[in-house]
Image (cartoon, helix red, strand yellow):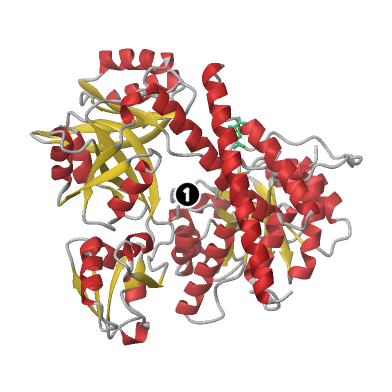
């Protein structure tokens, strides 16, 4: 077969795949209709888990790796759940469906708010009428006066935090929040004609984008930066001028609306840059009880001590999870605060109704801002336990686990517990023979959780920075947490900026400064055992005293079991163990250590050849 013939086959297959995906979506909507007739929750994570395990196993038999299959199905299921939710909402709020929908947002065509508006309203099959606004106030005015049905407003950003102006305007509006969505903010360098970065002399952008991309821009010293009112204005200008020496900065999708193409992407200093938007309308919506809802309200309490705590206790007593609490000053009442609260509950649920009536008795002011479907469809995770199910071998006779420590370690998205210990791989050096991505893929495939690679000490700080960044990007791709050795207090904050867990190098000089820096960090820290238990515990105390309570001890020298048990009697900190893969009894050792309450294993490997040991260890640790 020649290239054209092979490509023709691929094209045919892709068409078949799309037809099948459309059929699947149709069936998922049938499921929604059935759930409407015989009410039950839209989301069924048990079903999703069973489906994923089956698909992963079928995929493996066909030579597809587990991570690949999981990623594809997370996307398919997310769309399936959101489409089912939208169908239920349309049945419940028929006024929402009309031939044209008008929406007000900040900026011109191509702005981040515009892209958010398009994404949110794409769920309705109606033509979009867009109202460009110059301020948040104008968005509120446009919707309040009925010129637009919906307004889209950014409310918080993962890098810059709460957007105070929007919070302040909500305090006084008659509008209701009827929806939310979270949008990744991915800054790109956009150009109108075929050109190269070296040919650029001027870049147009918004000051906030400039700030968020400062590190990249410092690598282009000869390029002049000109500010515009919004990133969409910059795009418009560059599209009009069509010159090879100028570019704009903004989203790739937004640029495409102006005929611009991205020359470089991923420019933001912080890679996880996301904005949460709220959708406002004149009338509140009703949210079906079968779908996860959020309710937003504002309240002010008296200034007496404990007033806020009392309100939060009401929520806790009714088992209502709070997802956000933000305070803003009340204009005209110095030192009084208005609290913005988001809870994961339907305003019409009995628990929420009971909580609201109790809150009314103890607050000075309370107003419901809206109840809306939650935009988050958190991916169903398959535990290592489920993936590694095989007939259970005979367990060696381990002693009964000691009382489990009270401190719960959270590494990335993994909650560490004696039942589900953490499984990390720590490469002794940066991989040379294969790519880091291949190592990550293997770790994921074998059931590991954390990818650890040394990033410091082999070059200048820019080189180290690029390793930290590579590690974090590759791990994210494979849904793994990240780890590196930290040798001194200067490295610590740099590692903490990008990675999930920090392993302090044992016995380096300037120990105190390192412990203090680790104690000030908000990342979990692994502290290697010192010569004596007394020294280890003193080091731990020093670190904890700085505020960071996410601390675990790690045995890096395979100490005798009795020694570890003795240590456990004196501390509530979780204990992890670093193991070498050469050990022929590695898996058995793991089981014994898990039996005595060791909460994690760090497999120290020289290269990818030793990774198969991880699979054996995972299988023994996670089977029932
Ligand atoms: C389709 C269903 O609804 C949801 C979507 C699923 C899917 O797309 O596979 C699975 C479970 C539910 O969370 C269902 O319940 O079967």
Residue at the far left in the pictured view: 332
Q: Quadrant of residue 346?
A: top left
* Residue at left offset 63%, top offset 43%: 416
The residue wearing badge 1 is 548
Q: Can residue 431 be seen in this view?
A: no
* Residue at left offset 31%, top offset 75%: 192
Q: Nearer the viewer, residue 327 or 386?
A: 386
Q: What crowding class fits label 1: few (fewer than 14 Cα within 10 Å), some (14-19), or many (20 or more)?
A: some
The percent coordinates of residue 129 (x first, y second) are 24, 45
Q: In this view, does 210 lie to the left or right of 597?
A: left
In the displayed structure, 521 sits above or below 84; it is below
* Residue at left offset 52%, top offset 36%: 81
Residue at the far right in the pictured view: 394
Q: Nearer the viewer, residue 616 or 32?
A: 32
Q: Nearer the viewer, residue 460 or 370?
A: 370
The percent coordinates of residue 504 (x first, y second) are 57, 62
Which quadrant of the rendered structure holds the C terminus? top right
Which SS class for mark 1? Answer: loop
Q: Quadrant of residue 471?
A: bottom right
Which quadrant of the rendered structure holds the N terminus? bottom right
* Residue at left offset 50%, top offset 68%: 469
The percent coordinates of residue 196 (x first, y second) are 37, 83
- Which quadrant of the frame does ligand 1 lie within? top right
- Beta carbon at label 1 within 8 Å of ligand 1: no
């Amino acid at each position: 077969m020649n290239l054209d013939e092979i490509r023709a086959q691929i094209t045919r297959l892709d068409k078949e795949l799309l037809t099948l995906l459309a059929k699947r979506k149709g069936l998922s909507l049938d499921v929604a209709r059935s759930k409407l007739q015989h009410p039950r929750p839209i989301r069924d994570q048990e079903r999703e888990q069973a489906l994923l395990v089956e698909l992963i196993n079928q995929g493996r038999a066909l030579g597809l790796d587990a991570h690949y299959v999981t990623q594809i199905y997370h996307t398919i299921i997310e769309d399936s759940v959101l489409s089912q939710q939208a169908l239920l909402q349309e049945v419940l709020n028929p006024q929402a469906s009309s031939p044209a929908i008008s929406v007000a947002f900040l900026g011109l065509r191509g702005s981040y708010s515009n892209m958010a508006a398009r994404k949110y309203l794409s769920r309705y099959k109606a033509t979009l009428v867009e109202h460009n606004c110059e301020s948040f106030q104008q968005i509120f005015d446009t919707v309040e006066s009925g010129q637009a049905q919906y307004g889209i407003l950014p409310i918080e950003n993962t890098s810059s935090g709460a957007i105070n102006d929007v919070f302040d305007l909500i305090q006084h509006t008659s509008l209701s929040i009827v929806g939310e969505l979270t949008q990744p903010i991915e800054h790109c360098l956009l150009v109108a004609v075929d050109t190269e970065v070296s040919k650029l002399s001027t870049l147009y952008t918004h000051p906030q984008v400039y700030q968020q991309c400062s590190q990249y821009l410092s690598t282009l010293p000869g390029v002049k930066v000109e500010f515009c009112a919004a990133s969409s204005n910059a795009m418009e200008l560059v599209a009009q001028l069509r010159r090879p020496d100028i570019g704009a900065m903004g989203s790739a999708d937004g640029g495409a609306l102006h005929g611009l193409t991205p020359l470089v992407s991923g420019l933001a200093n912080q890679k996880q840059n996301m904005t949460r938007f709220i959708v406002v309308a004149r009338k509140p919506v009703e949210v079906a009880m079968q779908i996860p809802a959020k309710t937003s309200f504002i309240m002010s309490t008296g200034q007496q001590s404990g007033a806020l705590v009392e309100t939060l206790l009401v929520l806790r007593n009714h088992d209502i999870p709070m997802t956000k609490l933000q305070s803003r000053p009340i204009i005209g009442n110095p030192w009084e605060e208005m609290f913005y609260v988001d809870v994961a509950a339907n305003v019409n649920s009995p628990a929420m109704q009971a909580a609201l009536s109790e809150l009314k008795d103890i607050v000075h002011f309370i107003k419901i801002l809206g109840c809306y479907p939650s935009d988050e469809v958190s991916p169903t995770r398959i535990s290592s336990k489920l993936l590694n199910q095989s007939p259970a071998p005979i367990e060696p006779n381990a002693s009964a686990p000691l009382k489990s420590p009270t401190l719960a370690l959270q590494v990335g998205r993994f909650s560490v517990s004696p039942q589900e210990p953490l499984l990390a791989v720590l490469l002794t050096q940066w991989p040379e023979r294969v790519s880091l991505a291949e190592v990550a893929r293997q770790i994921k495939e074998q059931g590991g959780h954390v990818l650890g690679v040394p990033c410091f000490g082999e070059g200048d700080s820019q080189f180290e920075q690029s390793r930290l960044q590579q590690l974090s990007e590759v791990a994210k791709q494979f849904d793994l947490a990240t780890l590196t050795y930290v040798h001194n207090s200067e490295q610590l904050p740099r590692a903490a900026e990008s990675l999930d867990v920090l392993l302090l190098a044992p016995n380096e000089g300037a120990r105190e400064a390192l412990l203090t820096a680790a104690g000030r960090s908000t990342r979990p820290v692994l502290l290697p055992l010192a010569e004596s238990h007394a020294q280890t515990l003193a080091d731990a105390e020093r670190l904890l005293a700085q505020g960071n309570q996410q601390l675990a001890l790690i045995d890096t020298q395979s100490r005798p079991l009795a020694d570890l048990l003795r240590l456990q009697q004196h501390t509530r900190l979780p204990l992890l163990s670093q193991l070498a893969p050469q050990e022929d009894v590695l898996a058995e050792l793991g089981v014994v250590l898990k039996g005595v309450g060791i909460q994690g294993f760090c497999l120290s490997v020289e290269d990818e050849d030793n990774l198969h040991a991880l699979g054996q260890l995972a299988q023994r640790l996670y089977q029932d």
